[in-house]
Amino acid sequence: MARMTMIEAVRSAMDVSMERDDDVVVFGEDVGYFGGVFRCTQGLQAKYGKTRCFDAPISESGIVGTAIGMAAYGLKPCVEIQFADYMYPAYDQITQEAARIRYRSNGDFTCPIVLRMPTGGGIFGGQTHSQSPEALFTHVCGLKVVVPSNPYDAKGLLIASIEDPDPVMFLEPKRLYNGPFDGHHEKPVTPWSRHELGEVPEGHYSIPIGKAEIRRQGSAVTVIAYGTMVHVALAAVEEMGVDAEVIDLRSLLPLDLDTIVQSVTKTGRCVVVHEATLTSGYGAELAALVQEHCFYHLEAPIVRVTGWDTPYPHAQEWDYFPGPARVGRALAEVMEA
Amino acid sequence: MTEFPQLSLHVPEPAVRPGGMPDFSNVNIAKAGSVPRPEVDAASEDIRDLAYSIIRVLNRDGEAVGPWAGLLSDEELLTGLKHMMKLRAFDARMLMAQRQGKTSFYMQHLGEEAVSCAFRKALKKGDMNFPTYRQAGLLIADDYPMVEMMNQIFSNEMDPLRGRQLPIMYSSKEHGFFTISGNLATQYVQAVGWAMASAIKNDTKIAAAWIGDGSTAESDFHSALVFASTYKAPVILNIVNNQWAISTFQGIARGGSGTFAARGLGFGIPALRVDGNDYLAVYAVSHWAAERARRNLGPTLIEYVTYRVGAHSTSDDPSAYRPKTESEAWPLGDPVLRLKKHLIVKGVWSEERHVQSEAEILDEVIQAQKQAEVHGTLHAGGKPSVRDIFEGVYAEMPPHIRRQRQKAGY
């Protein structure tokens, strides 16, 4: 089996999809000739031609708006928003258009589009290249929201997203592009080639949207995470020596509630981890669901570990990023309670 | 002391407010037949004048004159007249139905009937409109059943949109009518995307984008022009300038550009300004633009100069922001009366036949309304199921929505 970075995995997903289906088109800022600022679309224009992979003007509302029109025609656009932080000009098109076209037309028109966007911090990107806006999407009915944590999932989930009949927000944690970053920024990152989830089939496969994966079995506490924080949580669990169960959500909307409920019912303790800001973050939804469904099994208050409620700073990046030490303290807190 | 004066902010005002005498003397109106008709492959920079003039075919005497005349047969014009009359009668009945509480909301076309009715003729089966809320003529002129429109307006048990959408926000893929959103300008750039898709697939279909004068100020309008220009998309970019954006006169959105059509010039998009109350001129110009698109020559921007005679919707009162008699002073007249006069002058129509036709059309509308009302109106009779709230958010209902539906008791 091939070894791929997450960049190669998402590229392979688009390649496989474009090969199988002429209706799949890829466009966005710098994605054509150059192949994208993170190189995710490298080679696609050369292989499939300029009308199936091309550069777009710097206009996110235009990129998403035209993608919606193309989907109404019958194409399956998979477009790149250069950074998740740049999606705001397209927010009207995403929330009031893409998300509602099926509903408001009673299925007369549909919107099978995918918006790929690099998300999260850890690359000294400052406040405009580090955001995690997933909660701004999970609050919108009609969207699906996917956040992979490794190359194998990234490819399978992206293929599933492209084949999905509804709009999918596909958030790619950019700090994971080259390896399973666990928050220890002072150490060199392990490349995906040395990680089992860097083994990716060359051909077509898909992973169903809405199914979580348990990354570590355990009985003492449940850690719910997604994206980069899955690896941070795994590192923290090992360092603390806690017998934690670590759930990688993979899909936030729809959510695999059954896996969460089963785990917390067993462990009685729960830590929710994400990089996005705390207040009204997706962790609030997770905490609410856990208490609704597992209240009588809980032995301690649910603890959230998240980015601070401030813009993402530049120089103080590692004091902002919820690294393994902070997750570790949360684990200790919830175990002592 | 500075050599410069203190700065002051310029806030444009319409020429006249309520209580004043309506005055359109500043509206520069070209003589019918006086604006040339360029070849469809003309470059934008060679026809700049067309963005500042007004293309007109029908003169004061009801004759069709000039290079844009002569495209439609008598029979087609009679059909066009009946479409406009039908739209007007439909509006009058639905406005009354709203007053009677049979629906929550309505938007009429009074004075603007020619724009959507004549435009529809320039499109073919399979082409796609991305309309705003004031282009129901696209459906009427394509013989979409009125009863279906009324079912939607009444949100009754036969509503094709299952009660989910505000009245008049129709959707019909079959009739080339993209689902109306209700928020503004978003559809403009979507139309460009649809047209790009048709070109990507080497298809022959074209798209039409619609927007009002007010919402050209939205960024999606500008995104649409950039994308249309860059990729030479086969799309007709329509701006319906009916002078008023609810209570805001068109000068607030237009700023210092002179005309809305002129917005196209900076993008290298051929831009034409047309008398929107002249059925023949609207058809001639939209046909010209459609031919450009079909020949892969790219987008065309058209500004239809018209006047919104009625209120913006059933939720506002125009007498609070403009003189009551302003519509009577509007120099481009009434589209129905102008086409009627033309057909009488041609000897193919008469006052008597017009009156008879009005009665027949009204009867047809009333019959459709009776048929729709059998299936309910907003607060009485059959209505969509509560189940319909939860269906269709996604192709497949996810577990959390299923749980909520069960909680609601369905």
Image: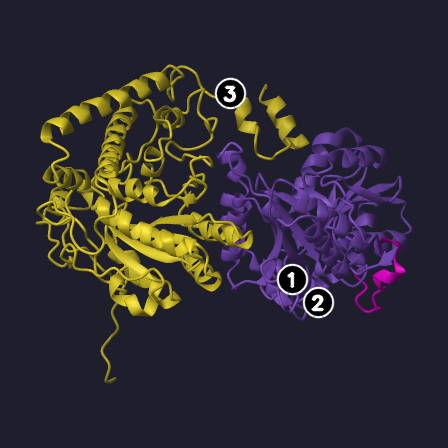
In this view, the mark in front (2 or 3): 3
Q: Judge the density around disc 2: few (<14), some (14-19), many (≥20) Cα neighbours within 10 Å.
A: few
- Give the residue number, with chain letter if any, for mark 1: A130
Q: Secondary structure at mark 2?
A: loop
- Give the residue number, with chain letter if any, for mark 3: B385
- Give the residue number, with chain letter if any, for mark 2: A123
The residue range painted magenta reads A183-197
The image shows residue A237, relative to residue A7, as above or below, that is: above
Residue nearest the observer in this picture, B74 or B269: B74
* Residues behind callouts 2 and 3 on a single chain: no
Residue B220 position within the rendered picture, expressed as x and y whole percent measured from the top left: 43, 55
Among the 4 quarters of the image, the one containing residue A265: top right
Label 2 close to label 3 by CB (< 8 Å): no
Q: Which chain is rendered purple in the image?
A: A
Which amino acid type corresponds to the residue marked 1 in the rendered image? Answer: Ser
Residue A154 position within the rendered picture, expressed as x and y whole percent measured from the top left: 75, 52
Q: Is residue B363 visible?
A: yes
Looking at the rendering, in which quadrant would you find the N terminus of chain B? Answer: bottom left
